[in-house]
Image (tube, rainbow, N blue to C red):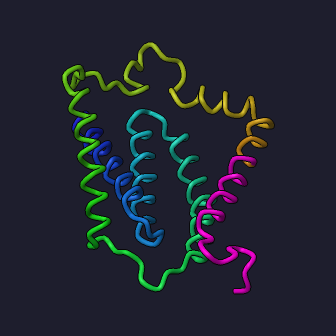
Amino acid sequence: MTYFMFLMMVALILGLIAVASNPTPYFAALGLVVAAGVGCGILIGSGGPFLSLVLFLIYLGGMLVVFAYSAALAAEPFPEAWGSRSVLLYVLVYSTGVFLVAGSFLGGWYEGSWVVVDGLKELCLLRGDISGVAMMYSFGGSMLVICAWVLLLTLLVVLELTRGLSRGALRAV
């Protein structure tokens, strides 16, 4: 299980590097989907399947729609692909930074320290993610308003970033 979770974390880092290194939204979408899927897989491995399912459905339902809308507005005639030199340079710089930071933390980590939430089944009455679900629903009204406001703010920021030299969403399509 430890090796599988290590592989999932490496895939998460590679997906995040793919998102950060590619300036074209068309090709960065694959890295975003990989990062979200692997992040949900890490949550499942940690003992939170319900939270992982909710997070993945919210991602697919909300943020992917925002991404598709902003990618449609940011149409480029010649987008930069994975093989271009600038993208490969960014991948190299980000990978070097990740390896340097990981190397500084490598000495203090222990392989057996990965404990899932349900690792001590004899001492628990409920599953690990059930208490999180109760906490999520107990503050439901205020958290719904906060999440809606954050999604609206994210939509406006993405639309502002992708408008380029034209008028963005207000232009005649």
> Where is 37 relative to 144, above or below?
below
Image quarter for residue 89?
bottom left
Q: Where is residue 49 in the image (x, y as percent from the top left)?
A: 49, 40
User: Looking at the magenta stretch, what is its main secondary structure?
Assistant: helix
Image quarter for residue 3?
top left
**What range of the chain is rendered magenta?**
149-173
Image quarter for residue 23?
bottom left
* Quadrant in the picture for the N terminus: top left
- Residue at 41% in and 15% down: 122
Answer left or right for 141 relative to 5: right
Q: Where is residue 125 in the image (x, y as percent from the top left)?
A: 53, 18
Q: Where is residue 108 in the image (x, y as percent from the top left)?
A: 23, 19
- Residue at 26% in and 69% down: 85
Q: Is 36 a magenta residue?
A: no
Q: Position of residue 62 (x, y in %)?
A: 63, 58
| Pick the front one: 30 or 92 | 92
* Quadrant in the picture for the C terminus: bottom right
Answer left or right for 49 relative to 114: right
- Residue at 65% in and 78% down: 166
Q: Seen from this angle, which residue lies furthest front?
A: 165
> Where is 170 relative to 125, above or below?
below
Q: How many marks?
A: 0
Q: Is 167 a magenta residue?
A: yes
> Where is 80 relative to 114, above or below?
below
Q: Seen from this angle, which residue lies furthest top?
A: 123
> Where is 63 relative to 162, above or below?
above
| Pick the front one: 36 or 51 | 36
| Pick the front one: 32 or 25 | 25
- Residue at 46% in and 52% down: 36
